[in-house]
Amino acid sequence: MPAEAQFRWPGADCRLFVGVGVNPAQQQQIAAVLATLPAALKPVPQQNLHLTLRFLGQSSETPARQLWTQLAAAALPAFTVRLDELLCWPGAKVLCLAGSVTDPALQQLDKVINQAAALAGYPPPHHQLYPHITLARHAGQLPEPPLTVPVLSVEPTQLHLYQSVSTPAGVRYPILASLPLLPA
Ligand code: 2AM
């Protein structure tokens, strides 16, 4: 079945982003660290941990399908990214595990996604790709005592189109479509 056929549209405009997940072992590693956070911080639920590659914002179905059809026809390289720096973004009050783009395959994938997003009519990204996983919210500063966080080597095998759904019970990120990332 072509990848485009496996696109599950929720039926109304929605908030979208393109990203990758972390594997279950890494989810558990992170969850173990988050369980030790000060009570004031709000840890991201284990099943929500992800790395955003391209935020799309509120979207209708047509551009989202266009984007995914183009990505399905493109070469999507598998990449590795090392996340080794615990950062607090005081403005957003977000605690995250961050790294940088060192793998040329990630540079290439970023370019392919941005080209496809532009052709589908999405506005350009506000900033260049800055790989990170958000770990917790309500974080005005780095926690004390300092957290020991694992160095994560994220090596995803699939690219996902995520919906971001806010509910009274919290945010959820259902996957609407997926494509394989292929080793060079
Ligand atoms: P994050 O990647 O820093 O956690 C769904 O909201 C996802 O899109 C989250 O991963 C979130 O941030 C990211 N996101 C939300 N608003 C964004 C924006 N304006 N620009 C870039 N990414 C955004």
Image: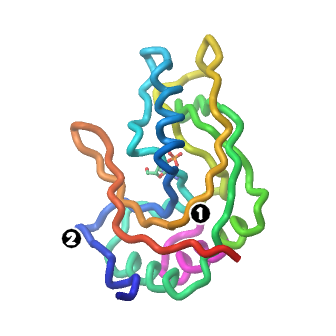
* Disc 2 residue crowd, few under 14, some 14–19, many 20+, Cα 10 Å: few
Magenta-drawn stretch, dominant element (helix, strand or loop): helix
Q: Which residue is tagged 2? A: 11
Q: Considering only vertical position in the picture, is 161 above or below 61?
A: above
Where is residue 155? Give x, y as percent: 62, 57
- Would residue 58 appear left or right of 74 to someone viewing this image? left
Spatial CA distance of label 1 from label 2 is 25 Å
Residue at left offset 78%, top offset 57% = 102
Identity of the residue furthest to the front in this view:
25
Where is residue 20? Give x, y as percent: 51, 58
Where is residue 46? Give x, y as percent: 41, 39
Mark 2 lies on a secondary structure that is loop
- Would residue 54 appear left or right of 169 to someone viewing this image? right
Where is residue 70? Give x, y as percent: 50, 85
Circles 1, 2 touching at the beta carbon (< 8 Å): no
- Would residue 31 appear left or right of 45 to someone viewing this image? right
Residue type for callout 1: Pro
Tag 2 or tag 1, which sits nearer the N-term? 2
**Which quadrant of the figure has residue 48?**
top left
Colouring of the image: rainbow
Q: Which residues are magenta?
A: 111-124
Q: On residue 58, which mark appears? A: none
Residue at left offset 60%, top offset 76% = 76
Q: Tell whether position 183 is magenta.
A: no
Q: Which residue is tagged 1? A: 125
Residue at left offset 47%, top offset 64% = 56
